Image (cartoon, helix red, strand yellow):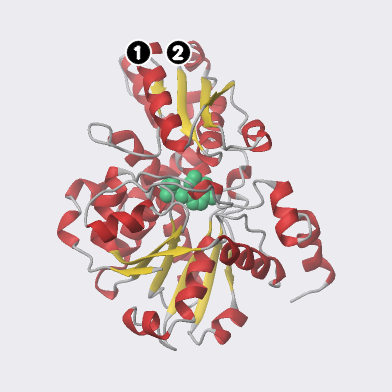
């Protein structure tokens, strides 16, 4: 299903632009030096899909290996944790501290006394836990009953708390316990009165958008005309969409939001013209997108930047995963990671949608594979091979 949308740019505030615009990545980059394995993720051209769908190019930014955590989420939660700890440390010491000093001996005792928490489907919690671990702080992560044992284990937190019910319930519970125990809640979704921290999380993601534009420029390719962004609560999509619009200025870019048809909270919000929760019936394999209430800030931004909201089925997501696995070089994309391609393929094969979104032979499409095989068993059952086997194919059969 597709909902065409007239973007209302007036909805974006100056503060949204300052947080996510062209200056944002430079604020985040110093914190990346605290990671051991920081490097740019690859940008890969899907030439055969571009030819088949009659556009100039389709590029995928592959976030599957970001900071060794398996998804772009590594950029957001950990960065927010580090920024918040820096503030706390400066208050404690009564002086400014550098990013390098966050892991110095003087920081150790204040760090040991701080607990960061959040609710997660998996990837955001992994990022918050990693940020806390780098600093020597404690992390407690809340997961809902649908999060698989393997995903909960992979979070690597000091403590993982199971909450009955769905993702939205785990968000409420994390907030309640954080208040009660005076823990620092680093949520990737926002609501009235709680916007600043989720905006920091979203600011972290701008690094990948800037990196993609730099890689595109370095390859001598013109910037994208369309971007398809998968959404859970919308924090990721709003960050990338606003950053790209600000960076590309008058050249402009059309944003299309892609959600599972079983968890389409932004789609129903766009249809209703106001923030609206989705009534869940069944769970989706796109587990990282299984959110039923949009982030307040994300909805405000996407209402201003998105040209369409669309839903994809479980089967479309599986097909997209297999197509990325079959590409040379192969791209290992989890269920949520492949959703952007699933959305693009559904638009590209729909003449009315193509025409309304101005998708032509000159169009340049940007997609983001937001995660690798973060649930290995599920990946293997859908693709018919493990992530390692898929990668091996690229070694044995060069492009
Ligand atoms: C792999 C992946 N893709 C996309 C998203 C969607 O991000 P958001 O919830 O900010 O919309 C998530 C969220 O956890 C994710 O883990």
Q: Residue 29's mark?
A: none
Q: Is residue 238 visible?
A: no
Relative to residue 73, is residue 94 depicted above or below? Answer: above
Which residue is painted at 47% across and 31% down in the image?
119
Q: Along the polypeptide, which appears first: circle 2 or circle 1?
A: 1
214 left or right of 294 in image: right
- Label 1 Cα neighbours within 10 Å, binned few <14 / some 14-19 / many ≥20: few
In the picture, the quarter occupied by the C terminus is bottom right
Query: Residue 114 location, x and y as percent?
Result: 45, 16
68 left or right of 22 in image: right
Relative to residue 108, is residue 120 depicted above or below? Answer: below
Query: Residue 357 location, x and y as percent?
Result: 34, 78
Which residue is painted at 47% across and 69% down in the image?
366
Q: Which residue is mark 2?
A: 110
Nearer to me, 40 or 311: 311
220 left or right of 321 in image: left
Q: Which residue is mark 1?
A: 92
| Residue found at the very far front of the displayed protein | 281
Real-space CA distance between mark 2 and mark 1, rounded to the nearest whole angstrom: 8 Å
Which residue is painted at 60% across and 64% down in the image?
315
In the picture, the quarter occupied by the N terminus is bottom left
Cβ of mark 1 under 8 A from ligand 1: no
Cβ–Cβ under 8 Å for marks 2 and 1: yes
């Amino acid at each position: 299903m597709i909902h065409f949308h007239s973007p209302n740019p007036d909805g974006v505030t100056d503060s949204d632009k300052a947080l996510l615009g062209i200056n944002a990545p430079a604020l985040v980059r110093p914190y990346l030096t605290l990671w051991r394995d920081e490097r740019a993720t690859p940008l890969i051209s899907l030439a055969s899909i571009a030819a088949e769908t009659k556009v100039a190019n389709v590029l995928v930014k592959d976030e599957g290996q970001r900071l060794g955590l398996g998804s772009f989420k590594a950029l957001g939660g950990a960065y927010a944790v580090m920024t918040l700890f820096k503030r706390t440390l400066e208050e404690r010491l009564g002086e400014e501290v550098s990013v390098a000093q966050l892991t110095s001996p003087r920081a150790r005792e204040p760090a040991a006394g701080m607990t960061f928490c959040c609710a997660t489907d998996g990837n955001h919690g992994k990022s918050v836990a990693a940020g806390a671990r780098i600093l020597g702080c404690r992390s407690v992560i809340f997961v809902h009953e649908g999060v698989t044992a393997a995903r909960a284990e992979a979070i690597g937190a000091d403590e993982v708390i199971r909450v009955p019910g769905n993702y939205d319930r785990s968000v409420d519970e994390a907030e309640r316990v954080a208040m009660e125990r005076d823990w620092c809640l680093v949520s990737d979704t926002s609501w009235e009165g709680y916007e600043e921290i989720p905006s920091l999380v979203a600011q972290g993601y701008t690094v990948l958008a800037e990196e993609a534009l730099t890689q595109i420029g370095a390859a001598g390719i013109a910037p994208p005309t369309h971007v398809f962004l998968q959404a859970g609560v919308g924090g990721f999509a709003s960050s990338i969409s606003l950053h790209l619009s600000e960076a590309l200025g008058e050249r402009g870019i059309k944003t299309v939001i892609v959600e599972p048809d079983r968890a389409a909270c932004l789609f129903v919000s766009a249809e209703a013209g106001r923030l609206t929760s989705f009534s869940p019936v069944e769970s989706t394999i796109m587990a990282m997108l299984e959110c039923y209430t949009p982030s307040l800030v994300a909805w405000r931004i996407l209402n201003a930047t998105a040209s369409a909201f669309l839903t994809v089925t479980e089967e479309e997501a599986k097909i997209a995963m297999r197509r990325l696995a079959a590409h040379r070089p192969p791209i290992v994309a989890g269920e949520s990671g492949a959703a952007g391609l699933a959305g693009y393929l559904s638009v590209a094969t729909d003449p009315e949608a193509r025409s309304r979104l101005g998708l032509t032979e000159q169009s340049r499409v940007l997609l983001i594979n937001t995660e690798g095989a973060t649930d290995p068993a599920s990946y293997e059952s859908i693709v018919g091979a493990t992530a390692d086997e898929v990668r091996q194919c690229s070694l044995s059969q060069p492009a």
